[in-house]
Amino acid sequence: MPIVIVAIGVLLLLFLIVKFKMNTFISLVIVSILVGLGLGMDLTKIVTTVETGIGGQLGHLALVFGFGAMLGKLVADAGGAYRIATTLINKFGRKKIQIAVVIASFIIGIALFFEVGLVLLIPIIFAIATELGMSILYLGLPMVAALSVTHGFLPPHPAPTAITAAFDANIGQVLLLGLIISIPTTIVAGPLFSKVAVKLMPNAFQRRGNIKALGEQKTFNIEETPGFAISTLTSLFPVILMALSTIISLVVQGDSEFKRIIEFIGAPGTAMLISLLIAIYTMGYARKIPMNKIMDSVSESISQIAMMLLIIGGGGAFKQVLIDGGVGDYVAKLFTDTNMSPLLLAWLIAAILRICLGSATVAALTTAGLVAPLMAAGSVNPALMVLATGAGSLIASHVNDAGFWMFKEYFNLSLKETFQTWTLLETLISIMGLVCVLILGMFI
């Protein structure tokens, strides 16, 4: 049975990554080839399928992912992210400090990848918590909730961008619906959960963080950083362009030159390029930073994401093998006569793979290969399938996920406390995301 072969492939992938400590990209390519053999694919076509999967995945993603990394690096290096966080925290004051942390983390989370945003924000959170005499975890949970939600639901982050391409969804619609889902999800998993968690596990909230785990940190003089408004606008510019393009395309009926121009500007690659050029000016040239220094930041950003690009390509290869090997069609036939929602099925498969593999991106891409044929058979909205898959891929982060260990070390928690806080928070995000997707599915 195809499902048994896929299950064996997933177990082998888990074995190679966890037991043998093999690189994730290499493991994905090996498993893709072996699963292709197990599915009885033509020997001469397996490697071609792997190449097609990698090329097709990166062809859709490289521009958005690459330009996004460059933009985020420029905002971070210029102190724009630092300005956003400190300004909002100072404006909101002690009573609404968690809301300030959520808003700052959400804005920064859109521009920066999860790990970068975490490393950048933690020193600020630690400093504010010490100054106000608060628990660092009381501010840290809302922060990681916002960063995780943007990472799981919103382009131009890797997983939502990759599965948007895999499901052939409109990226602007994914962004708009993702924003709608993100707000209640962040509130529940962040501020509300922290208020419950402090009563259930008070010892964890008494811990002092381990800022040494972050290594050497870049310090900023607030007067020398870009202004709050320009930093925020630069960070959110790609989101604004893609969202506006989607809204105008929906509102303006028929075909016109104006509509075509707007859709061109709002296309992911174009929107990211325009936003990057603006960031080069606002975060660099306008601040009298030499162009060679600006380009150094750009080059460094690409070196930091090179392996992630390969891993996403490897996930694309595995997905393509599942499609070409007929597994997707097999899954579609299995659920032909069932009343289970394709949205719920996508979430469930992504959740199982996430728990097994650890990587949200790999879990999401593998799920896309399994459930994509269900979309052809039904009338489910592709953008909602993207978000349901993204929600499932965030569930129950544990010891096979790098984020688990980063959170544990930075907040100086025990394993039990990390499960009680980080793992539970990620699970809340996943379940809340699914609930919101199912509610939206009743109207769209």
Image (cartoon, rainbow, N blue to C red):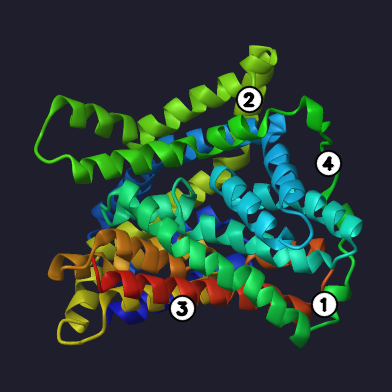
Q: Is residue 325 left or right of residue 218?
A: left
Mark 2 nearby-residue class (10 Å; few <14, some 14–19, many ≥20): many
Residue at point 82%, 77% (across, down) = 204
- Front residue of 167 and 30: 167
Mark 3 nearby-residue class (10 Å; few <14, some 14–19, many ≥20): some
Task: Give the Cα distance between marks 2 and 1.
Answer: 38 Å
- Labels 2 and 4: the sequence-earlier one: 4
Task: Give the Cα distance between marks 3 and 2.
Answer: 41 Å
Residue at point 32%, 45% (across, down) = 56
Q: Nearer the viewer, mark 2 or mark 4?
A: 2
Q: Are marks 2 and 4 in contact (CB under 8 Å)?
A: no
- Element type where label 1 sits in the image: helix
Task: Give the Cα distance between marks 2 and 4.
Answer: 19 Å
Q: Is residue 366 left or right of residue 204?
A: left
- Front residue of 162 and 340: 340
Q: Nearer the viewer, mark 3 or mark 2?
A: 2
Q: Quadrant of residue 218?
A: top right
Identity of the amino acid at label 3? Ile
Q: Are marks 1 and 4 in contact (CB under 8 Å)?
A: no
Is residue 10 visible in the rendered image? The answer is no
Query: What residue is pinned by disc 1?
Result: 204
Query: What residue is pinned by disc 2?
Result: 283
Position in image of residue 62 (x %, y %): 43, 38
Position in image of residue 256 (x %, y %): 12, 29
Mark 1 nearby-residue class (10 Å; few <14, some 14–19, many ≥20): many
Q: In the rendered image of this protein, does residue 391 appear above or below residue 306? A: below
Q: Nearer the viewer, mark 1 or mark 3?
A: 1
